[in-house]
Amino acid sequence: MAVLKKRAIKDGYEVTDELIFQEQISGLDAKKPIRKSLQDLMDAVEEHKVDVCYTFELTRISRDPYNLVERVKWFTDRKIPMYIYDAEMWTLDRETKEELEETTSYVFGAATYGKVEIRKMKERTMRGRNEVAKEGMYVGHLSDGYCVVKTERGKEIRVDEDREEVIHKIFDLYTQGNTIDRIAEYLNTNNIPSANSYRLNSPKFKGYQETYRRKGSVVPIKRVGIKWQGSTISNYLHNKWYMGERTYNKQTYYIEPIISTEQWRVVSAMLERNAISFRSKKESTKHPYLLSGLLFCGNCGRRMYGHFTGLNNHYYCSSVEEGVKCGLRGVSKENIEAAVALVVKQKGGLDVVEGKEGVVSNFFKVSPKEEKRLKEEIKTNNKLIAEYEKKSDELDKNYAEAVKQTVKHADDKNRVAVYESMIAEIEDEKINLNNKKYRLTQQNILNTKKLNVGSNADKILTKLMDERNLSTLRELFVTVIEKVHVFNLTPSINVIIINFVDGTKECFLYSYRLMKQKIKIFTRSLFYYDMRDNVLRYKDSSVIVDAKELIKTDPLLIPFERLEELTDKAKEQDAKYKEWRKKYNTGLPTTVPYVVKDETYKEISLKKKHLYNRKYKIKKHKKLTSEEKKQMLAEIDKELAFLSAKVKYLNREEAVKEYRKQKGNR
């Protein structure tokens, strides 16, 4: 600007500040049809405020060759001479206002050359940056957990020791079975700063701006006090920097890892498995289901998901969501969670429910010999997984080649048939490899879980005694339990089998109606559960045991307390639900033993519609007092609850079939 101003004054022109047009732009701005500063200059020309124009070089007008020629012509048509400083040329003769052929040729040449030069400049810049990234130097993005250290070589990327523990904690918590939202909640509760908050206060990131301005706005965006979010945790778990792979400009370079390859594989498998989970994110994060991911259906082997209604919260088989009902009845969320907590308490010698101190048994410890075996098995599995991945890459290449040949020789039916057969074989082999990788990865997840039992159980139990909250109890479940299976022994009695990570099992009977809040543990009893025939048998004689008689005559039933008692909020909620039940209790059974005719459905629907209309009229009534309205509405609500209960548990399709069948027989 100073150089151009000096030249204009030397040529005898007056330069005012309002006629100096400058703008600092980015690459995105350069792609716009016209920039603000250039538009202001063109407006000044239209208002006859400008006699001549000075520019340092042609690229200041435009970097696009077509736009450049068009805009220079725009000034030429309006008889405004333009001086190009670096070429020392005028576009028009200042006296005659005629176009100079030499300058016109230069403009066309510079426009074409400029486009080529810009492309070459980008290539040279990216080539230099790639070399910098290859040597482990800082360029572009810097992930949390790493910092820049100035050395003789330049700005090197190193592991940030102050953040390394945070990264390890995130991956460890996820490996233990915590959801990304629970991990974010844990980090916020323990006042662990996010990446932005940490960099603001760390001397390693001196000059890190506290605020930045959104493009096109003057409002600063604060970076202080930013909390952890579930989406942030997900980005961390997917970030390959932490396993030693840094991607820059679509190329991968090595960087010092923070997380081991074994743990990365386990986390990746868990992320893939959870991505296709049947549980909705909204429901699973809003209400804590302590056995989510651990509870499985005994009929079909599918996972069970939690369904929150407020009154009757249950776990159901995911076959219901998939539309292929396997027939397993749901189990009460509150009861099964409390029963499993009781069994874990007895297994570990610790009263989890009441919070009393106890002695942790050897169940929570892994022997050195077993630890060595598990680590060797994990290494072996990782080698096999790496081999399978190489084979998978080779199959992908063969598959692509076979498809290419099929298209190439489309006219030759015999050759096409051969290649199609090859494609089918490759697809089958790929599926087989993926299944093998999945099984090995699942085995590694279980082995990692077993190894973590010894190091994590004591901490979790101590934390549970101090805090006594459900999220900590969930951590304990994930740490010591492999799977929990639910079987319907009878319509009202369930068999629950808990598989612990040490290979042992605990079985117990549970029935909401017959046993209420009690269970019968029978792992070490005189009888066992026969999965094939779905019956209880005596161990010696294999005679079938009558479960109902056993429950009635056995005095050694173990009572348990619901886990909601652990929190004050849950106490208030439970009291609210009990009051609701008491107020609107209809006295009807949970299932209606008779078949309802189609006419009954219509009759009840009309009654409910009539009652809803009455409610609306009462609310709008002006002569009734608030107390009278409240009393009348309560009576209507009770009647509506009675009608809803009468048809709520009926399967209408089956009822209609049965009714037609009986009608046909008559």
Image (cartoon, grey):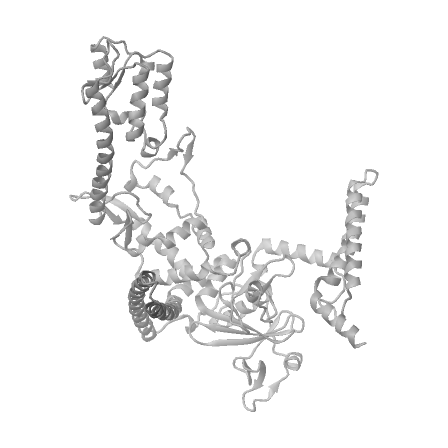
Q: Quadrant of residue 312?
A: bottom right
Question: Residue 495 in the image: x percent, y percent?
Answer: 57, 75
> As displayed, is residue 579 above or below residue 41?
below
Q: Is residue 354 left or right of residue 223?
A: right
Q: Looking at the figure, which quarter contains the N terminus?
A: top left
Name the residue furthest bottom.
541
Q: Nearer the viewer, residue 233 or 107?
A: 107
Q: Is residue 21 visible?
A: no
Q: Looking at the figure, which quarter contains the C terminus?
A: bottom right
Question: Residue 402 in the image: x percent, y percent?
Answer: 32, 64
Name the residue furthest left.
152
Q: Is residue 121 left or right of residue 419?
A: left
> As displayed, is residue 573 above or below residue 497?
above
Q: Is residue 295 visible?
A: yes
> As displayed, is residue 140 above or below residue 509?
above
Please give the name of the residue rendered at 28% of the width and 51% of the height, measured from the top-left corner: 246
Q: Nearer the viewer, residue 77 or 36?
A: 77
Name the residue furthest front.
411
